[in-house]
Image (spheres, rainbow, N blue to C red):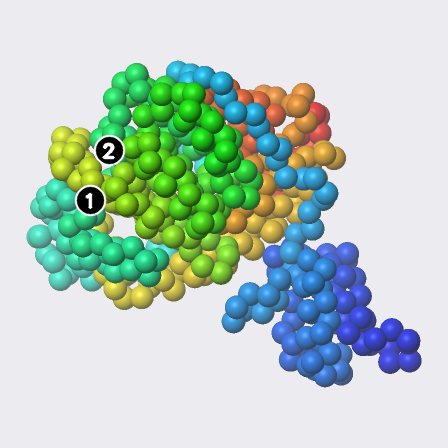
Amino acid sequence: MTAVIQRELDEFLYQQVVRLIRQLQQQQLLRPGERLPSLRQLSSQLGISIPTVRQGYEELERLGLIEARDRSGYYLKAQRQPECRPGRLPLSNKPVPVRQQSLLEQFYQAVHQPGILPLGIAQPSMAQPSEKALLRTMRRVTTLAGQQVMHYGPIDGFAPLKRQLALRYLDVGLSLQPDDLLITNGGQEALAIALQAVAKAGDVIAVESPTYFGVLELIETLGMLAVEIPVCPDDGIWLADLEQALGSQPIKACIFSTAISNPMGSFMPDAQREALVQMLEQRGIPLIEDDVYGELYFGAARGRPAQCFSRKGLVLTCSSFSKTVAPSYRVGWLLPGRYGREVWRLKRALSFASSLLNQWTLSEFIASGEYDRNLKKLRQVLKLNKERMMALVQQHFPAGTRVSNPQGGAVLWVELAKSADCSLLFQQALQQGISIAPGTLFSPSHKFRNCLRLSFGVRWQPEVELAIQRLGKLAILAS
Protein backbone atom coordinates (compact mmCIF):
# COMPACT_ATOMS: atom_id res chain seq x y z
CA MET A 1 0.00 0.00 0.00
CA THR A 2 1.41 3.39 -0.97
CA ALA A 3 -1.07 5.43 1.11
CA VAL A 4 -0.67 5.66 4.90
CA ILE A 5 -2.93 6.50 7.79
CA GLN A 6 -2.35 10.03 9.12
CA ARG A 7 -3.25 10.09 12.78
CA GLU A 8 -2.75 13.84 13.13
CA LEU A 9 -5.76 14.58 10.90
CA ASP A 10 -9.16 15.42 12.37
CA GLU A 11 -10.62 12.73 10.12
CA PHE A 12 -11.58 9.48 11.86
CA LEU A 13 -9.30 6.54 11.08
CA TYR A 14 -12.13 4.50 9.56
CA GLN A 15 -12.88 7.42 7.20
CA GLN A 16 -9.27 7.28 6.03
CA VAL A 17 -9.81 3.58 5.25
CA VAL A 18 -12.80 4.60 3.12
CA ARG A 19 -10.72 7.25 1.34
CA LEU A 20 -7.88 4.79 0.76
CA ILE A 21 -10.13 2.20 -0.90
CA ARG A 22 -11.66 4.90 -3.10
CA GLN A 23 -8.18 6.04 -4.15
CA LEU A 24 -7.19 2.49 -5.04
CA GLN A 25 -10.39 2.23 -7.09
CA GLN A 26 -9.71 5.51 -8.94
CA GLN A 27 -6.13 4.43 -9.68
CA GLN A 28 -7.52 1.07 -10.91
CA LEU A 29 -5.31 -0.78 -8.45
CA LEU A 30 -8.58 -2.29 -7.25
CA ARG A 31 -11.01 -3.21 -10.02
CA PRO A 32 -14.71 -4.07 -9.95
CA GLY A 33 -15.30 -7.59 -8.70
CA GLU A 34 -11.88 -7.94 -7.07
CA ARG A 35 -11.42 -8.94 -3.43
CA LEU A 36 -10.31 -6.26 -0.97
CA PRO A 37 -7.49 -6.98 1.49
CA SER A 38 -8.74 -8.97 4.47
CA LEU A 39 -9.46 -7.16 7.74
CA ARG A 40 -6.35 -8.68 9.31
CA GLN A 41 -4.16 -7.91 6.30
CA LEU A 42 -5.16 -4.25 6.03
CA SER A 43 -4.95 -3.83 9.80
CA SER A 44 -1.35 -5.06 9.72
CA GLN A 45 -0.40 -2.96 6.68
CA LEU A 46 -1.85 0.28 8.06
CA GLY A 47 -1.02 -0.23 11.72
CA ILE A 48 -4.60 0.18 12.91
CA SER A 49 -7.02 -2.13 14.68
CA ILE A 50 -9.17 -4.74 12.97
CA PRO A 51 -12.40 -3.12 14.31
CA THR A 52 -11.35 0.18 12.67
CA VAL A 53 -10.85 -1.54 9.31
CA ARG A 54 -14.16 -3.31 9.73
CA GLN A 55 -15.90 0.01 10.44
CA GLY A 56 -14.40 1.44 7.25
CA TYR A 57 -15.53 -1.54 5.21
CA GLU A 58 -19.03 -1.36 6.71
CA GLU A 59 -19.22 2.30 5.68
CA LEU A 60 -18.11 1.41 2.14
CA GLU A 61 -20.75 -1.29 2.08
CA ARG A 62 -23.41 1.17 3.27
CA LEU A 63 -22.41 3.50 0.44
CA GLY A 64 -22.89 0.67 -2.04
CA LEU A 65 -19.22 0.62 -3.07
CA ILE A 66 -18.35 -2.87 -1.83
CA GLU A 67 -20.19 -6.02 -0.82
CA ALA A 68 -19.53 -8.69 1.78
CA ARG A 69 -19.64 -12.31 0.63
CA ASP A 70 -20.16 -15.08 3.16
CA ARG A 71 -16.86 -16.74 4.18
CA SER A 72 -15.11 -14.99 1.32
CA GLY A 73 -14.45 -11.36 2.28
CA TYR A 74 -15.27 -7.98 0.78
CA TYR A 75 -15.40 -7.21 -2.95
CA LEU A 76 -15.45 -3.99 -4.97
CA LYS A 77 -18.72 -3.47 -6.84
CA ALA A 78 -19.12 -1.96 -10.31
CA GLN A 79 -20.40 1.59 -10.06
CA ARG A 80 -23.63 2.00 -11.98
CA GLN A 81 -24.66 5.25 -13.60
CA PRO A 82 -28.08 6.75 -12.75
CA GLU A 83 -30.99 5.45 -14.83
CA CYS A 84 -28.86 2.83 -16.52
CA ARG A 85 -31.28 -0.11 -16.33
CA PRO A 86 -33.20 -1.12 -19.46
CA GLY A 87 -36.58 0.60 -19.65
CA ARG A 88 -40.02 -1.02 -19.38
CA LEU A 89 -41.68 -2.09 -22.64
CA PRO A 90 -45.38 -1.81 -23.49
CA LEU A 91 -47.42 -5.01 -23.62
CA SER A 92 -47.86 -6.50 -27.10
CA ASN A 93 -51.45 -6.24 -28.37
CA LYS A 94 -51.57 -9.49 -30.36
CA PRO A 95 -49.75 -12.81 -30.90
CA VAL A 96 -47.42 -13.05 -33.89
CA PRO A 97 -45.81 -15.83 -35.94
CA VAL A 98 -42.08 -16.28 -35.36
CA ARG A 99 -39.67 -15.84 -38.28
CA GLN A 100 -36.10 -15.92 -36.99
CA GLN A 101 -34.36 -18.58 -39.10
CA SER A 102 -32.23 -16.32 -41.31
CA LEU A 103 -30.70 -14.24 -38.51
CA LEU A 104 -30.25 -17.32 -36.30
CA GLU A 105 -28.27 -19.08 -39.02
CA GLN A 106 -25.95 -16.07 -39.34
CA PHE A 107 -25.56 -15.96 -35.56
CA TYR A 108 -24.67 -19.65 -35.17
CA GLN A 109 -22.24 -19.55 -38.10
CA ALA A 110 -20.46 -16.62 -36.47
CA VAL A 111 -20.16 -18.40 -33.11
CA HIS A 112 -18.22 -21.29 -34.64
CA GLN A 113 -15.89 -19.31 -36.87
CA PRO A 114 -12.23 -19.89 -35.89
CA GLY A 115 -10.56 -17.00 -34.13
CA ILE A 116 -13.84 -15.40 -32.99
CA LEU A 117 -14.15 -14.32 -29.36
CA PRO A 118 -17.57 -15.81 -28.39
CA LEU A 119 -19.26 -13.01 -26.44
CA GLY A 120 -22.54 -13.82 -28.18
CA ILE A 121 -23.15 -17.32 -26.85
CA ALA A 122 -23.90 -18.19 -23.23
CA GLN A 123 -21.53 -20.91 -22.03
CA PRO A 124 -21.10 -20.08 -18.33
CA SER A 125 -19.39 -23.36 -17.46
CA MET A 126 -16.46 -22.24 -19.65
CA ALA A 127 -15.66 -19.49 -17.15
CA GLN A 128 -14.54 -22.16 -14.66
CA PRO A 129 -14.16 -25.40 -16.65
CA SER A 130 -14.36 -28.70 -14.81
CA GLU A 131 -12.87 -30.84 -17.56
CA LYS A 132 -10.07 -32.38 -15.46
CA ALA A 133 -12.43 -33.62 -12.75
CA LEU A 134 -14.91 -34.78 -15.38
CA LEU A 135 -12.26 -36.71 -17.30
CA ARG A 136 -11.12 -38.42 -14.10
CA THR A 137 -14.69 -39.36 -13.33
CA MET A 138 -15.39 -40.61 -16.85
CA ARG A 139 -12.27 -42.79 -16.84
CA ARG A 140 -13.35 -44.29 -13.52
CA VAL A 141 -16.87 -44.94 -14.85
CA THR A 142 -15.54 -46.53 -18.04
CA THR A 143 -13.34 -48.87 -16.02
CA LEU A 144 -16.11 -49.85 -13.60
CA ALA A 145 -18.95 -50.17 -16.10
CA GLY A 146 -17.09 -51.75 -19.00
CA GLN A 147 -19.30 -52.56 -21.98
CA GLN A 148 -22.47 -51.44 -20.20
CA VAL A 149 -21.82 -47.82 -21.18
CA MET A 150 -21.83 -48.83 -24.86
CA HIS A 151 -25.50 -49.83 -24.68
CA TYR A 152 -28.70 -47.80 -24.91
CA GLY A 153 -29.76 -46.44 -21.56
CA PRO A 154 -33.33 -46.51 -20.22
CA ILE A 155 -35.72 -44.23 -22.09
CA ASP A 156 -36.47 -42.17 -18.99
CA GLY A 157 -32.81 -41.97 -17.92
CA PHE A 158 -30.12 -43.49 -15.71
CA ALA A 159 -31.70 -44.28 -12.33
CA PRO A 160 -28.74 -43.22 -10.10
CA LEU A 161 -28.61 -39.81 -11.81
CA LYS A 162 -32.36 -39.36 -11.32
CA ARG A 163 -31.94 -40.20 -7.62
CA GLN A 164 -29.19 -37.56 -7.32
CA LEU A 165 -31.43 -34.95 -8.92
CA ALA A 166 -34.40 -35.85 -6.73
CA LEU A 167 -32.22 -35.42 -3.63
CA ARG A 168 -31.05 -32.00 -4.83
CA TYR A 169 -34.63 -30.82 -5.26
CA LEU A 170 -35.30 -31.64 -1.60
CA ASP A 171 -32.97 -28.74 -0.74
CA VAL A 172 -35.46 -26.28 -2.29
CA GLY A 173 -38.53 -27.93 -0.78
CA LEU A 174 -39.64 -30.02 -3.75
CA SER A 175 -40.30 -33.66 -2.89
CA LEU A 176 -39.91 -35.97 -5.89
CA GLN A 177 -39.55 -39.62 -6.68
CA PRO A 178 -36.81 -40.51 -9.20
CA ASP A 179 -39.54 -41.79 -11.54
CA ASP A 180 -40.96 -38.25 -11.61
CA LEU A 181 -37.94 -37.15 -13.69
CA LEU A 182 -37.23 -37.69 -17.38
CA ILE A 183 -33.63 -37.35 -18.63
CA THR A 184 -33.33 -35.53 -21.98
CA ASN A 185 -30.69 -34.58 -24.53
CA GLY A 186 -30.02 -31.15 -23.07
CA GLY A 187 -32.41 -28.48 -21.93
CA GLN A 188 -33.55 -27.74 -25.48
CA GLU A 189 -35.03 -31.22 -25.92
CA ALA A 190 -36.72 -30.87 -22.54
CA LEU A 191 -38.34 -27.63 -23.72
CA ALA A 192 -39.36 -29.20 -27.05
CA ILE A 193 -41.00 -32.18 -25.33
CA ALA A 194 -42.75 -30.00 -22.75
CA LEU A 195 -44.12 -27.63 -25.38
CA GLN A 196 -45.46 -30.44 -27.55
CA ALA A 197 -47.04 -32.08 -24.49
CA VAL A 198 -49.21 -29.03 -23.74
CA ALA A 199 -49.80 -27.29 -27.10
CA LYS A 200 -50.15 -27.84 -30.84
CA ALA A 201 -49.66 -25.92 -34.09
CA GLY A 202 -51.61 -22.69 -34.18
CA ASP A 203 -51.73 -22.29 -30.38
CA VAL A 204 -50.63 -19.05 -28.70
CA ILE A 205 -47.66 -19.29 -26.31
CA ALA A 206 -46.80 -16.49 -23.87
CA VAL A 207 -43.06 -15.76 -23.71
CA GLU A 208 -40.90 -13.25 -21.90
CA SER A 209 -39.86 -10.11 -23.74
CA PRO A 210 -36.94 -10.29 -24.31
CA THR A 211 -36.71 -14.09 -24.29
CA TYR A 212 -34.20 -16.82 -25.17
CA PHE A 213 -34.10 -17.25 -28.94
CA GLY A 214 -34.06 -21.05 -28.62
CA VAL A 215 -37.62 -20.84 -27.28
CA LEU A 216 -38.64 -18.71 -30.26
CA GLU A 217 -37.09 -21.17 -32.70
CA LEU A 218 -39.06 -24.00 -31.10
CA ILE A 219 -42.31 -22.04 -31.38
CA GLU A 220 -41.53 -21.26 -35.02
CA THR A 221 -40.66 -24.87 -35.85
CA LEU A 222 -43.86 -26.18 -34.25
CA GLY A 223 -46.07 -23.68 -36.09
CA MET A 224 -47.25 -21.88 -32.96
CA LEU A 225 -47.72 -18.15 -32.26
CA ALA A 226 -46.00 -16.07 -29.59
CA VAL A 227 -47.30 -13.22 -27.45
CA GLU A 228 -44.69 -11.19 -25.57
CA ILE A 229 -44.92 -10.37 -21.84
CA PRO A 230 -42.48 -7.60 -20.80
CA VAL A 231 -39.78 -8.46 -18.25
CA CYS A 232 -38.78 -6.28 -15.32
CA PRO A 233 -34.95 -6.17 -15.15
CA ASP A 234 -35.10 -7.13 -11.47
CA ASP A 235 -38.16 -9.28 -10.76
CA GLY A 236 -39.10 -11.15 -13.94
CA ILE A 237 -42.29 -10.69 -15.94
CA TRP A 238 -44.77 -8.02 -14.94
CA LEU A 239 -47.67 -10.01 -13.51
CA ALA A 240 -50.15 -7.21 -14.26
CA ASP A 241 -49.19 -7.39 -17.93
CA LEU A 242 -49.58 -11.17 -17.93
CA GLU A 243 -53.01 -10.91 -16.32
CA GLN A 244 -54.08 -8.40 -18.97
CA ALA A 245 -52.80 -10.66 -21.76
CA LEU A 246 -54.61 -13.68 -20.29
CA GLY A 247 -57.84 -11.70 -20.39
CA SER A 248 -57.46 -10.65 -24.02
CA GLN A 249 -55.48 -13.41 -25.76
CA PRO A 250 -56.22 -17.16 -26.21
CA ILE A 251 -53.01 -18.19 -24.44
CA LYS A 252 -52.56 -21.96 -24.39
CA ALA A 253 -49.32 -22.15 -22.36
CA CYS A 254 -46.48 -20.00 -20.98
CA ILE A 255 -42.70 -20.46 -21.16
CA PHE A 256 -40.88 -18.35 -18.55
CA SER A 257 -37.52 -18.39 -16.74
CA THR A 258 -38.53 -17.30 -13.26
CA ALA A 259 -35.20 -18.01 -11.53
CA ILE A 260 -32.61 -16.33 -13.79
CA SER A 261 -34.07 -15.07 -17.04
CA ASN A 262 -32.13 -15.02 -20.30
CA PRO A 263 -31.14 -12.43 -21.51
CA MET A 264 -32.21 -9.99 -18.77
CA GLY A 265 -30.89 -11.90 -15.73
CA SER A 266 -33.89 -11.03 -13.54
CA PHE A 267 -34.80 -13.11 -10.49
CA MET A 268 -38.46 -13.46 -9.54
CA PRO A 269 -39.04 -13.42 -5.74
CA ASP A 270 -40.68 -16.58 -4.38
CA ALA A 271 -43.89 -14.76 -3.41
CA GLN A 272 -44.26 -13.42 -6.94
CA ARG A 273 -43.48 -16.85 -8.37
CA GLU A 274 -46.22 -18.38 -6.23
CA ALA A 275 -48.68 -15.70 -7.42
CA LEU A 276 -47.74 -16.50 -11.04
CA VAL A 277 -48.47 -20.21 -10.59
CA GLN A 278 -51.81 -19.50 -8.89
CA MET A 279 -52.82 -17.09 -11.66
CA LEU A 280 -52.15 -19.69 -14.35
CA GLU A 281 -53.53 -22.74 -12.55
CA GLN A 282 -56.78 -20.92 -11.78
CA ARG A 283 -57.21 -20.64 -15.56
CA GLY A 284 -55.94 -24.16 -16.32
CA ILE A 285 -52.91 -22.85 -18.26
CA PRO A 286 -49.64 -24.84 -18.11
CA LEU A 287 -46.37 -23.13 -17.23
CA ILE A 288 -43.12 -24.43 -18.73
CA GLU A 289 -40.28 -23.18 -16.56
CA ASP A 290 -36.90 -22.92 -18.28
CA ASP A 291 -34.67 -23.33 -15.22
CA VAL A 292 -31.25 -23.93 -16.82
CA TYR A 293 -29.71 -21.00 -14.90
CA GLY A 294 -31.38 -21.79 -11.57
CA GLU A 295 -28.14 -22.99 -9.93
CA LEU A 296 -26.16 -19.95 -11.12
CA TYR A 297 -27.61 -17.40 -8.68
CA PHE A 298 -25.50 -14.60 -7.21
CA GLY A 299 -27.63 -13.98 -4.12
CA ALA A 300 -27.75 -15.77 -0.80
CA ALA A 301 -29.85 -18.73 -1.97
CA ARG A 302 -31.35 -20.44 -4.98
CA GLY A 303 -34.92 -19.49 -5.85
CA ARG A 304 -37.55 -22.17 -5.37
CA PRO A 305 -38.68 -23.62 -8.71
CA ALA A 306 -42.22 -22.67 -9.73
CA GLN A 307 -43.19 -26.34 -9.44
CA CYS A 308 -42.91 -26.00 -5.65
CA PHE A 309 -46.07 -23.88 -5.74
CA SER A 310 -48.10 -26.03 -8.13
CA ARG A 311 -51.29 -27.60 -6.78
CA LYS A 312 -52.73 -28.96 -10.04
CA GLY A 313 -49.62 -30.39 -11.72
CA LEU A 314 -49.68 -27.77 -14.49
CA VAL A 315 -46.02 -26.73 -14.09
CA LEU A 316 -43.31 -28.47 -16.12
CA THR A 317 -39.68 -27.78 -15.16
CA CYS A 318 -36.87 -27.99 -17.74
CA SER A 319 -33.18 -27.84 -16.86
CA SER A 320 -29.78 -29.24 -17.81
CA PHE A 321 -26.09 -29.53 -16.95
CA SER A 322 -25.08 -27.53 -20.05
CA LYS A 323 -24.67 -24.27 -18.14
CA THR A 324 -23.11 -25.71 -14.97
CA VAL A 325 -20.85 -28.54 -16.22
CA ALA A 326 -20.35 -28.93 -19.97
CA PRO A 327 -22.52 -28.05 -23.00
CA SER A 328 -21.18 -31.01 -24.99
CA TYR A 329 -22.57 -33.61 -22.56
CA ARG A 330 -26.13 -32.80 -23.68
CA VAL A 331 -27.77 -34.06 -20.51
CA GLY A 332 -30.90 -32.30 -19.36
CA TRP A 333 -34.06 -33.25 -17.52
CA LEU A 334 -37.77 -32.59 -17.32
CA LEU A 335 -40.17 -32.64 -14.37
CA PRO A 336 -43.45 -33.17 -16.23
CA GLY A 337 -46.08 -32.57 -13.53
CA ARG A 338 -49.33 -34.21 -14.64
CA TYR A 339 -48.02 -34.72 -18.19
CA GLY A 340 -45.72 -37.67 -17.38
CA ARG A 341 -47.22 -40.20 -19.78
CA GLU A 342 -47.22 -37.79 -22.72
CA VAL A 343 -43.64 -36.56 -22.22
CA TRP A 344 -42.42 -40.16 -21.87
CA ARG A 345 -44.05 -41.01 -25.21
CA LEU A 346 -42.55 -37.93 -26.89
CA LYS A 347 -39.07 -38.73 -25.54
CA ARG A 348 -39.29 -42.25 -26.93
CA ALA A 349 -40.43 -40.95 -30.32
CA LEU A 350 -37.89 -38.12 -30.60
CA SER A 351 -34.61 -39.63 -29.39
CA PHE A 352 -35.37 -42.88 -27.52
CA ALA A 353 -32.60 -42.38 -24.95
CA SER A 354 -29.78 -40.12 -23.80
CA SER A 355 -26.07 -40.92 -23.56
CA LEU A 356 -25.61 -43.52 -20.82
CA LEU A 357 -21.88 -42.78 -20.40
CA ASN A 358 -22.51 -39.08 -19.89
CA GLN A 359 -25.36 -39.68 -17.45
CA TRP A 360 -23.28 -42.17 -15.46
CA THR A 361 -20.34 -39.76 -15.35
CA LEU A 362 -22.52 -36.90 -14.12
CA SER A 363 -24.08 -39.13 -11.47
CA GLU A 364 -20.64 -40.00 -10.09
CA PHE A 365 -19.51 -36.38 -10.45
CA ILE A 366 -22.36 -35.23 -8.20
CA ALA A 367 -21.94 -38.09 -5.71
CA SER A 368 -18.22 -37.33 -5.29
CA GLY A 369 -18.91 -33.73 -4.24
CA GLU A 370 -16.93 -32.39 -7.21
CA TYR A 371 -20.05 -30.90 -8.80
CA ASP A 372 -20.94 -28.71 -5.83
CA ARG A 373 -17.33 -27.66 -5.26
CA ASN A 374 -16.99 -26.58 -8.88
CA LEU A 375 -20.42 -24.95 -8.87
CA LYS A 376 -19.49 -22.76 -5.91
CA LYS A 377 -16.32 -21.60 -7.68
CA LEU A 378 -18.22 -21.07 -10.92
CA ARG A 379 -20.74 -18.74 -9.26
CA GLN A 380 -17.90 -16.72 -7.73
CA VAL A 381 -16.07 -16.42 -11.07
CA LEU A 382 -19.23 -15.46 -12.95
CA LYS A 383 -20.09 -12.77 -10.42
CA LEU A 384 -16.55 -11.37 -10.70
CA ASN A 385 -16.79 -11.44 -14.50
CA LYS A 386 -20.14 -9.65 -14.35
CA GLU A 387 -18.72 -6.82 -12.28
CA ARG A 388 -15.76 -6.46 -14.63
CA MET A 389 -17.87 -6.43 -17.77
CA MET A 390 -20.43 -4.00 -16.36
CA ALA A 391 -17.65 -1.59 -15.45
CA LEU A 392 -16.11 -1.85 -18.92
CA VAL A 393 -19.43 -1.27 -20.68
CA GLN A 394 -20.13 1.78 -18.54
CA GLN A 395 -16.61 3.08 -19.21
CA HIS A 396 -16.39 2.53 -22.97
CA PHE A 397 -19.93 2.53 -24.37
CA PRO A 398 -21.77 5.75 -25.31
CA ALA A 399 -23.24 8.01 -22.67
CA GLY A 400 -26.82 7.00 -21.97
CA THR A 401 -26.21 3.28 -22.51
CA ARG A 402 -28.40 1.15 -20.24
CA VAL A 403 -27.23 -2.21 -18.95
CA SER A 404 -28.92 -4.89 -16.86
CA ASN A 405 -27.59 -5.98 -13.49
CA PRO A 406 -28.16 -9.76 -13.70
CA GLN A 407 -28.76 -11.58 -10.44
CA GLY A 408 -27.23 -14.76 -11.84
CA GLY A 409 -26.42 -16.48 -15.10
CA ALA A 410 -23.82 -15.35 -17.59
CA VAL A 411 -25.11 -12.50 -19.78
CA LEU A 412 -25.61 -8.73 -19.82
CA TRP A 413 -28.43 -7.03 -21.71
CA VAL A 414 -27.22 -3.74 -23.20
CA GLU A 415 -29.55 -1.05 -24.54
CA LEU A 416 -28.10 1.64 -26.81
CA ALA A 417 -29.72 4.81 -28.19
CA LYS A 418 -32.94 4.27 -30.15
CA SER A 419 -31.14 5.09 -33.39
CA ALA A 420 -28.61 2.25 -33.03
CA ASP A 421 -28.83 -0.85 -35.23
CA CYS A 422 -27.29 -3.81 -33.39
CA SER A 423 -27.73 -6.17 -36.35
CA LEU A 424 -25.28 -3.93 -38.17
CA LEU A 425 -23.12 -3.78 -35.03
CA PHE A 426 -23.14 -7.60 -35.03
CA GLN A 427 -21.64 -7.65 -38.55
CA GLN A 428 -19.08 -4.95 -37.73
CA ALA A 429 -18.00 -6.76 -34.56
CA LEU A 430 -17.47 -9.98 -36.51
CA GLN A 431 -15.03 -8.15 -38.77
CA GLN A 432 -13.02 -7.38 -35.62
CA GLY A 433 -13.13 -10.99 -34.38
CA ILE A 434 -15.93 -10.59 -31.83
CA SER A 435 -19.35 -12.24 -31.77
CA ILE A 436 -22.31 -10.65 -29.98
CA ALA A 437 -26.01 -11.51 -29.96
CA PRO A 438 -28.14 -8.78 -31.62
CA GLY A 439 -31.30 -7.87 -29.73
CA THR A 440 -33.80 -8.73 -32.46
CA LEU A 441 -33.00 -12.43 -31.90
CA PHE A 442 -34.83 -12.19 -28.58
CA SER A 443 -38.21 -11.02 -29.88
CA PRO A 444 -40.71 -12.62 -32.28
CA SER A 445 -41.81 -9.15 -33.41
CA HIS A 446 -38.25 -7.90 -34.05
CA LYS A 447 -38.14 -5.55 -31.07
CA PHE A 448 -34.81 -4.61 -29.45
CA ARG A 449 -33.12 -3.42 -32.64
CA ASN A 450 -30.98 -1.13 -30.45
CA CYS A 451 -30.06 -3.86 -27.93
CA LEU A 452 -27.47 -6.61 -27.68
CA ARG A 453 -26.56 -9.45 -25.35
CA LEU A 454 -22.99 -9.95 -24.12
CA SER A 455 -21.77 -13.09 -22.37
CA PHE A 456 -19.41 -12.89 -19.41
CA GLY A 457 -19.36 -16.70 -19.25
CA VAL A 458 -15.80 -16.80 -20.58
CA ARG A 459 -12.28 -17.30 -19.30
CA TRP A 460 -11.38 -13.72 -18.38
CA GLN A 461 -8.29 -12.49 -20.18
CA PRO A 462 -6.94 -9.20 -21.60
CA GLU A 463 -8.52 -10.02 -24.98
CA VAL A 464 -11.96 -9.78 -23.39
CA GLU A 465 -11.28 -6.28 -22.07
CA LEU A 466 -9.91 -5.16 -25.44
CA ALA A 467 -12.99 -6.60 -27.15
CA ILE A 468 -15.35 -4.56 -24.93
CA GLN A 469 -13.33 -1.43 -25.71
CA ARG A 470 -13.62 -2.11 -29.45
CA LEU A 471 -17.35 -2.79 -29.14
CA GLY A 472 -17.72 0.50 -27.26
CA LYS A 473 -16.11 2.40 -30.13
CA LEU A 474 -18.40 0.67 -32.64
CA ALA A 475 -21.41 1.45 -30.44
CA ILE A 476 -20.46 5.15 -30.29
CA LEU A 477 -20.39 5.24 -34.10
CA ALA A 478 -23.73 3.37 -34.28
CA SER A 479 -25.55 5.67 -31.85
Judge from the rendering whether residue 250 lies leftward or rightward of residue 44; answer left or right: left
Judge from the rendering whether residue 184 lies leftward or rightward of residue 419; answer left or right: left
In the image, what residue occupies the spot 16% across and 47% down?
A: 157
Judge from the rendering whether residue 145 lies leftward or rightward of residue 268; answer left or right: left
As drawn, the label of residue 346 is none
Residue 222 visible, this orientation: yes
- Look at mark 1 in the image and give the residue it sits on: 182
In the image, what residue occupies the spot 15% across and 54% down?
A: 159
- Crowding near the residue tagged with mark 2, few <14, some 14–19, many ≥20 C-alpha atoms within 10 Å: many
- Look at mark 2 in the image and give the residue it sits on: 193
Q: Which amino acid type is marked by label 1?
A: Leu
- Crowding near the residue tagged with mark 1, few <14, some 14–19, many ≥20 C-alpha atoms within 10 Å: many
Q: Is mark 2 on a helix, strand or loop?
A: helix
Residue 464 visible, this orientation: no
Q: Which amino acid type is marked by label 2?
A: Ile
Looking at the figure, which quarter contains the N terminus?
Answer: bottom right
Marks 2 and 1 in Cβ contact (< 8 Å): yes
Q: What element carries label 1?
A: strand
Residue 322 or residue 265, whichever sits in front: 265
Q: Where is residue 50 in the image (x, y as percent from the top left)?
A: 68, 81
